[in-house]
Amino acid sequence: KRLSSDKVIKQIEIFKGTNTLNEILNTIPVIFLVINDYRQVIYMNKTALDFAKIKDVSSIIGQRPGEVFGCIYASKGEGGCGSSEACTYCGCINVILASQEGKPAVNDCRLIIGPNEEAYVLRVWSHPIIFNNIDFYAVSLQDIGNEKRRQIFERLFFHDLLNTVNSLTLSLNLLDISKDENEKIEYIKKLNYYTRTITEQIQSQQILNAAETNNLTIASNKFNSIDFLSEMVKYYEDQLNSRQIKIQIDPKSENIEIETDKIILKRIILNIIKNAFEAINKDGKIIVGCVLIQNGVKIWVNNPGYIPREIQYQIFQRTFSTKGTNRGLGTYSMKLLSSYLNGNVTFTTSEENGTTFEVYFPIKPK
């Protein structure tokens, strides 16, 4: 249910007449809105107008915040913003609904907008106010994406790096005290793996930082798809075997000569495989494969795990993670890096068939 356009226009006029208030609010460097009881936008300060890429509220009469900002889920439900299944988990809507109980509320919101699916992490405040004897809600939104990403970058990178260094140190100590030659050979293999992993972790961080700042340089490498998948399987094979998880190449995979940036593609696929084995228990199986589709290549990674509905809607967002506070960036980095290959990453998930991440990219650079 929404207020009629005529009544919304009358409410807009109330705030148009407060010139001094407008001047003050236009100096605030955060997105500021006033909405009515039906969550329709009545007022926007300059920062909000700039973010929405509009000149004034007269062009969005009767619309709700998700519709104004171009949220990709705003058109998924019959009632617009707030009516789709994804909206159930929206931090912005939940904050506004909480403030409609009569108390100020605050929460974080992950917003994906536009055809390019730009991702934002916003902190949202909503305060109930009464103006001209009418109930309104003052809503402020601040972009905290850089802050969140910086925290995650640092903690995730140092956490993973420290774990690898600890494993490297342990293997060195065991090699030092071992008397058995076969044991020594195994420890040396582990040392090679851990040193390679440290290099990969540093390179991965460098690539992601460059991609985030639009400074990533793309190379062109020619390689075979089956050889590439074999390399990916080998990379994680020892680690997966220790957890009794099998990884194998789908026999239906096609032998394709690919020309793209191998290092970036490797980062994407290794990230997907890592997420797969973190999502399943022992005795599980991960299957990787590839086929030619029109003028492109599809590489997929399947695992038997299922992604719950509430998580599916947030899977590619910058700071979202199922692993706890200050984790994440895995699925977001897949999406980001694939765009540099003129490709895309999608996923399907069901309790019957598990979860499959698919990477699409041109067989040759465009």
Image (spheres, rainbow, N blue to C red):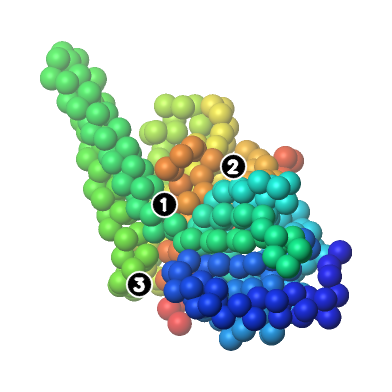
Residue nearest the viewer, comparing 222 with 71: 71
Earlier sequence position, callout 3 versus callout 1: 1
Residue nearest the viewer, comparing 27 with 280: 27
The image quarter containing residue 131 is: bottom right
Measured as percent of width and height from the top left, residue 21 is found at 55, 73
Measuring 23% from the left and 34% from the top, which residue is drawn there? Answer: 165
Give the residue at mark 2.
Answer: 303
Measuring 33% from the left and 39% from the top, which residue is drawn there? Answer: 160
Measuring 17% from the left and 21% from the top, which residue is drawn there? Answer: 173
Measured as percent of width and height from the top left, residue 177 is found at 14, 15
Give the amino acid type for the residue marked by disc 2 in the picture: Asn
Which quadrant is home to the C terminus? Answer: bottom left
Give the CA distance from mark 1 to mark 2: 29 Å
Give the CA distance from mark 3 to mark 1: 19 Å
Give the amino acid type for the residue marked by disc 3 in the picture: Asn
Secondary element at tag 2: strand
